[in-house]
Structures are given as structure tokens and as C-alpha cells.
Image (tube, rainbow, N blue to C red):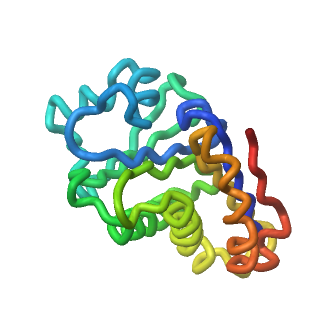
């Protein structure tokens, strides 16, 4: 298996890939939330799902929907994070592992994702991003690690002001994934 990791200062709804993963908290989607762009580009689809109680964003709540050409990806995987006040880095790791398993079962290997920025003690964004990379790739390594022709491409959408901080993640990720990352790590401003 080969791995292509990219970090891009583009909104998730503008990332060219087969599937975007929208990690969404319960409650309303407000302007300023990173999922607001996906909701806006899909004519309020996420808000509509929540208002009808069809998908709430509760912890572990998962739903796959077609983008119907409203964003650049073909599919949107909605993954609920539950309440913001109950959110922890450990919970994020669990949801990311579940996401990797689900996406691999769909036979998708071209992913866009954004890790939410959380303020407060214990929420160091770069560390959470690095852990998310590891946990998202893990199921693919288990299932495709020996397949030399399998390429997993993941684009992490990050805020433009965080791009400069990402250099510190390259070395640990290369160390963790070894020769699988000989293919590429790209930081795209």
C-alpha cells in the first residue's frame, strides 16, 4: 500500500476527492462552523436532516449521502461527534477509526476530511491532526498493507493560518508510516 497525504488550506466542500467526511457536532450548524460550507453548498441539506430528526449528529451517528454535484466530491459521509461539551481527543480517535473502517468497506481510497478545531485545555490541534492521520489510515493498512498497487489518498482540509504549523507533523508521520509515505506528503497553501 502507498499513502498520499495532503494538507490543504481549502474548504472541505472544495476538495477534489471521491468522498468527503463531515465530522459534525450535534445541534445547529452555525456560520463559522467548518461544516457550514458543506451545508451552504448543499442548499441547507445538513440542517434539513437535523431539523427532520433524520440525522442528528449524535455521537457515532453515521449517514452516507450523494453530493448530487453540489460539491466537488461524489459522496458525503456524515459522522456525528455528539455534544461539543462532551468532546475529547479520545472520542475523536474512535470516530476517526470508525470512519476509516466504513470508507474502506465502501472501497473508496480518495478521501477529503477536516478535523474540527476545538478550543480549550487538551485540544492541541496539530497533535489531534497527527493522531487523526494515524487512526484514519490504520484500517487501510490492516486490509491493504501488502497490496503494492493500492494507493490511499487523503486530503486534510485545514485553516490557512495553521498551514505553517504543519511542518512539525511531517517528520513524525514519515517515521510512523515509513516507506509507505515515500509517495508524498504535500502541504498546499
Q: Position of residue 168 (x, y in %)?
A: 69, 64
Residue 52 position by quadrant: top left
Q: Position of residue 86 (x, y in %)?
A: 21, 60
Quadrant in which the N terminus appears: bottom right
Give me the residue at 50% from left, 58% from top: 125
Give me the residue at 43% from left, 37% from top: 34
Answer above or below: position of 39 versus 110.
Answer: above
Give me the residue at 77% from left, 73% from top: 180
Answer above or below: position of 188 versus 2.
Answer: above
Query: Viewer-proximal residue, 65 or 120?
Result: 120
Q: Position of residue 102 (x, y in %)?
A: 44, 61
Query: Viewer-proximal residue, 115 or 123?
Result: 123
Q: Position of residue 87 (x, y in %)?
A: 28, 59
Residue 142 position by quadrant: bottom right
Q: How many marks?
A: 0
**Furthest-front residue in this view:** 121
Quadrant in which the C terminus appears: top right
Q: Is residue 142 left or right of residue 39?
A: right
Give me the residue at 67% from left, 56% from top: 166
Query: Viewer-proximal residue, 174 or 142?
Result: 174
**Furthest-right residue in this view:** 182
Q: Is residue 54 left or right of residue 17?
A: left
Q: Is residue 4 left or right of residue 154?
A: right
Amino acid at each position: 500500500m502507498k499513502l498520499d497525504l495532503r494538507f490543504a488550506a481549502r474548504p472541505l466542500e472544495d476538495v477534489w476527492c471521491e468522498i468527503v467526511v463531515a465530522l459534525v457536532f450535534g445541534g445547529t450548524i452555525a456560520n463559522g462552523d467548518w461544516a457550514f460550507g458543506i451545508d451552504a453548498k448543499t442548499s441547507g441539506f445538513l440542517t434539513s436532516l437535523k431539523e427532520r430528526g433524520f440525522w442528528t449528529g449524535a455521537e457515532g451517528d453515521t449517514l452516507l449521502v450523494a453530493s448530487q454535484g453540489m460539491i466537488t466530491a461524489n459522496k458525503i459521509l456524515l459522522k456525528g461527534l455528539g455534544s461539543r461539551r462532551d468532546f475529547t481527543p479520545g472520542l475523536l480517535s474512535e470516530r476517526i477509526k470508525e470512519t476509516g473502517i466504513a470508507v474502506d468497506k465502501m472501497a473508496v481510497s480518495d478521501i477529503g476530511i477536516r478535523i474540527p478545531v476545538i478550543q480549550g485545555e487538551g485540544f492541541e490541534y496539530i497533535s489531534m491532526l497527527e493522531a487523526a492521520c494515524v487512526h484514519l489510515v490504520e484500517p487501510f493498512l490492516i486490509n491493504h498493507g501488502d497490496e503494492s498497487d493500492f494507493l490511499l489518498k487523503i486530503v486534510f482540509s485545514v485553516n490557512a493560518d495553521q498551514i505553517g504549523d504543519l511542518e512539525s507533523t511531517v517528520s513524525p508521520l514519515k517515521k510512523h508510516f515509513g516507506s509507505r509515505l515515500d509517495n508524498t506528503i504535500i502541504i498546499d497553501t
